[in-house]
Image (cartoon, rainbow, N blue to C red):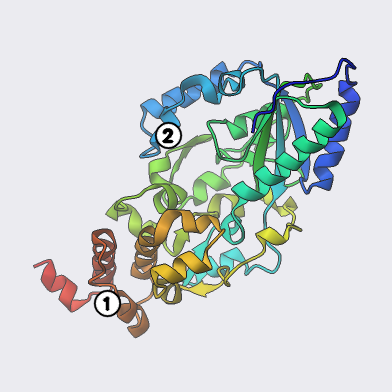
Amino acid sequence: MIEENTMTDLTPDYTTLAGEIKAWSKELGFQDIRIADAHADMSHVQSGLSEWLAQECHGEMHYMAKHGSKRSSPAELVPGTRRVISVRMNYTPPKAKDSWQVLQDSNKAFISRYALGRDYHKVVRARLQKLAEKIANEVGQFNYRVFSDSAPVMEVAWAQKSGLGWRGKHTLLLSRDAGSLFFLGEMYTDLPLPVDNPVDDYCGSCTRCIDICPTQAITAPYQLDARRCISYLTIELKGSIPEMLRPLIGNRVYGCDDCQLICPWNKYASITNEDDFSVRNGLDDVSLTELFSWSKEQFETRLAGMPIRRIGHEQWLRNLAVGLGNAPSSPAVIAALRRRRDDPSPLVREHVHWALLQHNDVVEREKDG
C-alpha cells in the first residue's frame, strides 16, 4: 500500500522515531529490525544478480529477470523511497518433530519447517502494515510500501546492508542471535530515519552447508545453482524433475532445510511464539503414503491458508511420487503408487512410473520394454 505524504509542518525527531519504531516492531512480534539507506551503493549486488541470471542459475524462475535494477534500487519500485526497514520473525514451530528424525525415516515426508503453519507472506505483511499505521499515528500520513517475499526486493541484500545479519555461504541471511530460521520483511519509506551499520561475516572457514547439500546446489561459498536446489525442484519447478536428481531428493517433498539444520549458528535459533506458525495437519511427522492418498479436495481444504497450497495438487503428487520412489520397498508403498498409475495428469503418471521402476515393479518394466 502507498499512502500520500501529508506530513505536518512539525519536523519529527527521527532519531527518537527510529527508537519508537524498533520498540513497536517488538510489540508486533518481530524479533529484530534494522534500517538501511535506500540510496546505498548496491551495484555489486546487481552485477552479481546479472551474472547469476546469465549463467541461467535461476532455472525457470523467469520473474527473477523481469524487473532489471528495481531489485537493487528501491526508488525505482516505490518513488521517493529513502529508507529500507528490514525485519525478521522466527518461524520454528513449537513441538514439531525433530527434523533429522523425519529425514532419516524414508517412509515419512519431510516438509521444510517454515511451511508447517500459516502462509508467512500474509502474517509478515499484516504486521508490517500495523507498524506503518503506528508510525502514521505518530507523524501523520507518509509514503511507504510493505513486502515479504512479494515483490522485486533483494531481501537478503537489504537485510545485510541494514545490519540485520550477514549472507551465509548457503546464501541465506544469518544472525549471531538467531541463526537463519526466520522470515524477512521490508518497509520502503520516505522517512529520513537514521541508518544502522552492517555486521561482519562470521561464517569463517566453515563449509558444512556446502558439504551437506544433497544435490550439491551450493556450487561455491555464497553461490547457489537453483536448478539443483531441492527447494527449487519441489516448489518453483512446474514440470518434470530431472531423473538424475530424483534419488538425491530422498523424502523431501516440499523444500529442504539441510543447509540450515547443519549450520552451527542455528543452535541460537528460537522457537516461535506465533500461533500462526504452529504445525497444522500433523505435517511435521506424517507418512508419504498418507499424503499421497489425499484427493484434490482434501489437499485444497486441509492446506488452505498454508504456503504448500500454492504449488497445487498435481505438483504435490509429483513430489510425493519421488519420495515414494526413494522409500524402502513395501506392499503399502507399491500399492499407493499403483493407485496413481492412471492419474489424469501426465506429470504425475511419469513420476509414478519412475517410482515404481525403483521398486522393480513388473508391469512398469514391461512398459519400458
Residue 118 at x, y percent in the picture? 61, 58
User: Badge 2: few (under 14), some or many (20 or more) residues near its Cα, within 10 Å?
Assistant: few
Identify the residue under disc 1: 338
User: Is residue 328 shown above or below 259?
Assistant: below
Q: Is residue 51 visible?
A: yes
Residue flagged by tag 1: what amino acid is it?
Answer: Arg
Callout 1: helix, strand or loop? helix
Quarter of the image where the N terminus is located = top right
Q: Amino acid at mark 2?
A: Tyr
The mark nearer the N terminus, 1 or 2, is 2
**How far across and down, in percent of the image, does residue 120 sit?**
62, 50
Q: Kindly identify which residue carries mark 2.
A: 63
Pair 1/2: label in front: 2
Taking the spot 67% from the left edge, 35% from the top edge, the residue there is: 186
Seen from the viewer's position, the closer of residues 90 and 202 is: 90
Q: Residue at x 36, y 29 (%)?
A: 55
Badge 1 crowding class, 10 Å Cα cut-off, few under 14, some 14 to 19, many 20 or more, is some
Q: CA distance from mark 1 to mark 2?
A: 37 Å
Q: Secondary structure at mark 2?
A: helix
Query: In this rendering, is residue 163 above or below 246?
Result: above
Q: Is residue 283 left or right of residue 89?
A: left
From the viewer's perspective, is residue 187 above or below residue 244? above
